[in-house]
Image (cartoon, rainbow, N blue to C red):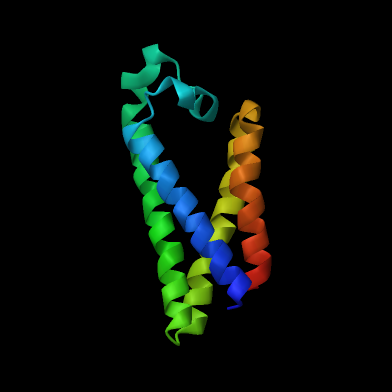
Amino acid sequence: MSTAAQVLASVIAVLLASVWLMESFFYRHSRLYPLFLLERRDFDAVRLWIVNLGFYNLSTAIALALGVVLARSGHVPQGEALVAFTAGQHVFLALVLLATERRLWLNTLLEGVPALVLLILVL
């Protein structure tokens, strides 16, 4: 796996870990309204899903980091496979996000474009 792919995978992993923190612990903060489109009255109703999604993003961040570690420690095919799967998954999920809520088009770009570039670099 190229150095560029490893760096991008690591950056995306850090971003996903940041999203985990926001979704799991700070989703009620008013500054995050543009990111989640959550109204105060909906906080309790969506808690189950948004916290779960946050931990999903954490596990994805760990998978990317593990893929980089595997590639750097001589297990290149395994590391590349893990990173490629995770990148492809996020390209798909970005498209699902756009189809589900067009107002989150910026989120779609932030999730999908780096993942697509990473997928191209790994393949």
Residue 57, horizontal then vertical, whole percent: 42, 48
Corner quadrant of residue 14: bottom left
Looking at the image, is 70 positioned above or below residue 118? below
From the viewer's perspective, is 54 left or right of 64? left
Residue placed furthest toward the top: 41
Corner quadrant of residue 26: top left
Quadrant for the N terminus in the image? bottom right
Looking at the image, is 88 positioned above or below residue 95? below
Residue 12, horizontal then vertical, whole percent: 52, 56
Residue 78 seen in the figure: yes
Task: From the viewer's side, name the closer residue of 22 and 104.
Answer: 22
Quadrant for the C terminus in the image? bottom right
Identity of the residue drawn at 49% across and 28% down: 36
Identity of the residue drawn at 63% across and 49% down: 112
Question: How many numbered marks, from 0 up?
Answer: 0
Identity of the residue drawn at 39% across and 44% down: 20
Identity of the residue drawn at 48% across and 79% down: 71
Residue 49, horizontal then vertical, whole percent: 37, 33
Residue 84 seen in the figure: no
Looking at the image, is 4 positioned above or below residue 56? below
From the viewer's perspective, is 50 left or right of 89? left
